[in-house]
Amino acid sequence: MARKFFVGGNWKCNGTTEEVKKIVTTLNEAEVPSEDVVEVVVSPPFVFLTLVKSLLRSDFHVAAQNCWVRKGGAFTGEVSAEMLVNLGIPWVIIGHSERRSLLSESNEFVGDKVAYALSQGLKVIACIGETLEQRESGSTMAVVAAQTKAIADKVTNWSNVVLAYEPVWAIGTGKVATPAQAQEVHCELRKWLHDNVSAEVAASTRIIYGGSVNGGNCKELAAQADVDGFLVGGASLKPEFIDIIKAATVKKN
Ligand SMILES: O=C(CO)COP(=O)(O)O
């Protein structure tokens, strides 16, 4: 089954109203491959979600950067999956490494969040990835397999899940994984899905790469067989995000 190229822009905790409007204008004016070729999703902070949704071109979509693990209620400061659905937000990022490390989100908590968001009808970009220490000690695959297993334990339908492999050492560091390093992990992850979920899920689930992706390195990464797109941080705030979206055309050649 063909996996449509996916490019997500994670704006993290950045932006003012004016900056957000400027980014959206740049996106709206860009000439990019059609929706049949690439799925584009941008993820502003919660407070800008409705603004971005109202201004953004209709072939691009929006994602929240997190949501609560269960039904809303007495959880001060949280935003529920139901609220995102109510606002017409189709996607949510879950398990980003910044939340795993800074806010101590465990594998199990992330698995529960993914399952709950899916149960409410959201589509999920589920993030996994190893730290530098874990890579250097040779445990990359064990770490990402455990993170993926915690999701697989709770999820039965993978059709609305995109798996984002984001090595922590590559995030915001300018130290991008080499195309071979990304391909190696993506290929292993697909094999893990094949062996532990199903051949269908392995073949159809998009596995995207995140960590210092930019306009200069995106094409070579996109050319890797098991790299189905990107989750972009810093560069998604800049016009070069358009070049990253255009890397989708590498897959057609
Ligand atoms: O964390 C990321 C996307 O979710 C990647 O961030 P950078 O592209 O800034 O390294």
Image (tube, grey):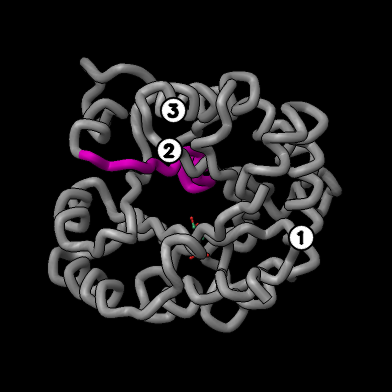
User: What's the mark number on residue 88?
Assistant: none
Dot 1: within a 10 Å radius of its alpha carbon, few (fewer than 14), some, or many (20 or more) residues? many
Residue located farthest toward the right when viewing the structure as drawn: 138
Whether tag 3 and tag 2 are in contact, CB under 8 A, the answer is yes
- In the rendered view, would you say 47 is above or below 11? above
Secondary structure found at label 1:
helix
Residue that numbered label 2 is attached to: 123
Q: Which residues are magenta?
A: 88-102
- Cα–Cα span, label 2 and label 1: 24 Å
Closer to viewer: mark 2 or mark 1? 2
Q: Is mark 1 within 8 Å of ligand 1?
A: no
Residue 252 placement (x, y as % from top left):
64, 71
Q: Earlier in the sequence, mark 3 or mark 1?
A: 3
| Magenta region includes residue 98 | yes
> Residue 119 appears in which quarter of the rendering?
top left
Using the image as rendered, state which of residue 223 and residue 210 is in the foreground: 223
Dot 3: within a 10 Å radius of its alpha carbon, few (fewer than 14), some, or many (20 or more) residues? many
Using residue 23 as the reference point, say whether residue 168 is left or right of it: right
Residue 87 placement (x, y as % from top left):
19, 38
Residue that numbered label 3 is attached to: 118
- Cα–Cα span, label 3 and label 1: 27 Å
Please name the amino acid that badge 2 sits on. Lys
Using the image as rendered, state which of residue 10 and residue 249 is in the foreground: 249
Secondary structure found at label 2:
strand
User: What's the mark number on residue 183?
Assistant: 1
Residue at 64% over, 53% down: 2
Using the image as rendered, state which of residue 111 and residue 61 is in the foreground: 61
Q: Earlier in the sequence, mark 3 or mark 2?
A: 3
Please name the amino acid that badge 3 sits on. Leu
Secondary structure found at label 3:
helix
